Image (cartoon, rainbow, N blue to C red):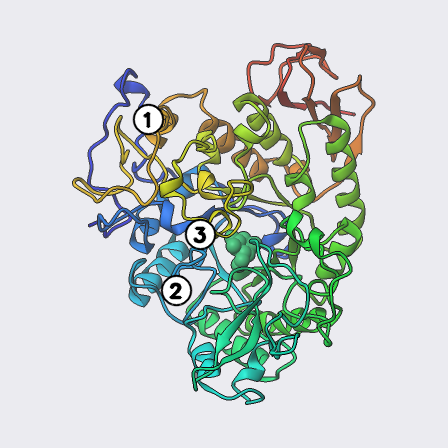
Amino acid sequence: MITSVVPADPPRPAEGLPASAVLTVDAPLPEERPAPAAPDVPWWRDAVIYQVYVRSFQDSDGDGIGDLPGVRARLPYLKRLGVDGVWLNPFYPSPQHDHGYDVADYKGVDPMFGTLEDFDLLVEDCRKLGLRLVLDTVPNHCSAEHPWFLEALAAAPGSTSRARFHFADGRGADGELPPNNWRAMFGGPAWSRITEPDGTPGQWYLHMFTPEQPDLNWRNPEVPVEFEKVLRFWLDRGVDGFRIDVAAGLFKHPELPDSPDPEADERTRDSVNPLAWNQPEVHEVWRSWRAICEEYTALDGRQRLLVGEASVPTPAEQAKYVRGDELHQAFFFHLLHAPWDAEHFHQVIDAAVRDITATGSTVTWVLNNHDQVRTTTRFGSPERARAAALLMLSLPGAAYLYQGEELGLPEVDDLPDEVITDPIFHRTGNRKGIRDGCRVPLPWAGTEAPYGFGPEGSAPTWLPQPASFARHTAERALADHTSPYHLYREALHLRRLLPQLGEGTLRWIETPPNVLAFARGDGLLVATNFGTVPAPAPVTGQPLLSSGPCPAGVLPPATTAWWIQPRL
Ligand code: GLC
């Protein structure tokens, strides 16, 4: 059982590496780095937050599933990496049909992940280490096992219990057809029919994801009141903010009419049904949540953060979510969806900086998360993934990292069908868009599964780790100064030391095709070569930091470099 942030294990050298090179994953923390930004600048504006997918981060009790004491035990690793805070994926009581995004109790901890006491200890440790703690909140839908939904099933059509959800009579002679043609994001119709308490086929309810995730009706005043209580429950326990799941959801067109293009609804995880997403009323909710955050800040001076998962078609549309009195930030997914292509990166960076900064917010960059194919695989090589990361960490604004990207983990794309847990696979019958491959438990140390994920003699990890993970353990990464871990660490520490890397300005510099280059503030130059042949470096001299070997005067393919150049 891991119970303390101070490790018990003595340092062990990674296989094949000299003991002198070894800095263990669990070594005590070095001295504090200088504090970031000026005290009056809200911390979140240029923060780098590390996403912890709790069930795959660190298992403390040997059941093969990560948990909160496991997260606690690894906080020193995250502190040493140099991130500003941690976002935890949902750990609330849940039947786990969508790994916690089906919440049965918004104010508890699932026993699988620990207890509320473990959570409180985690808050305390984060505070001691100066790490911000951001929780996931899931307001669009709850679990079909949430007491409200169970009550609604037992109640009559038209009851106040059903009014908290979207229940409707079916179409057709006997109500045998769904109330409209909407498709669910994870395959199949967005409606399921219930059996009424008297045993007769009954009404239908709306679920934009799986049938186990009924959508809440945000036009019912009880819903916002309940969520306000949920926010306060966690704010009172000391959290620094919330990541908001499906932040462009919540409200649906009041009449629930047919979608003009139902087929489109299933083609992408982005929110294409104009009637089910991005309704104007949602902005009122974000204004009220922002007011709650401000209220807490007024009490103790600590800034709280709301960061939304707002999948909307354009950066301009996204900008509406981060207006001054709404969310502080919204993930900028257009970079995450960009192919490895200089022109494409140029366009999305340009649009983000223009549209988002015009709101007074900062862009929230992201290249990896628990829903996407990891960059090492998506961009086609570890070198490109590293170059993209170093490019992202030089952009103005905040950034989110997903656990394991600092270890260069690839997508595990050969998991056998029998172990796949993603509801997308089970609802569509195919592997397109499935997410298990980026959720495989992290390799920490050693040469065999579970690679330090759990204590000695643990149950098998909930998803099997491939043999290739032996090359990607944190232990090896720390010992190898050319590993992605050290690249991320250097970049994160430079972000604290160089004022140019804060919010600041971005000025494009003319380059040959396939190369992007820009100046940040006064004197920092960044360039990425997206091509397959070396390009001339935009400046002379050795780079300050580069994502791979980078001799003076040359920018090798699939490489990003940072240079300090006075008087640019
Ligand atoms: C968000 C989450 C995803 C989840 C879905 C439904 O997109 O990131 O993991 O499956 O919402 O809650």
- The residue where tag 1 is placed is 467
Say which amino acid is labelled 2.
Answer: Ser
Mark 1 is surrounded, within 10 Å at the Cα level, by few (under 14), some (14 to 19) or many (20 or more) other residues, namely: few
- The residue where tag 3 is placed is 130
Q: Earlier in the sequence, mark 3 or mark 2?
A: 2
Element under disc 1: helix
Give the number of the mark in front: 3 or 1.
Answer: 1
Say which amino acid is labelled 3.
Answer: Gly
Say which amino acid is labelled 1.
Answer: Ala
**Residue at x 75% of width, y 56% of height:** 261
Which of the 4 image quarters holds residue 145?
bottom left
284 over 190 or under it: above or below: below
Residue that lies at the very extreme toward the right in this rendered image: 510
Query: Residue 35, labelled with which disc?
Result: none
Q: Earlier in the sequence, mark 3 or mark 1?
A: 3
- The residue where tag 2 is placed is 94
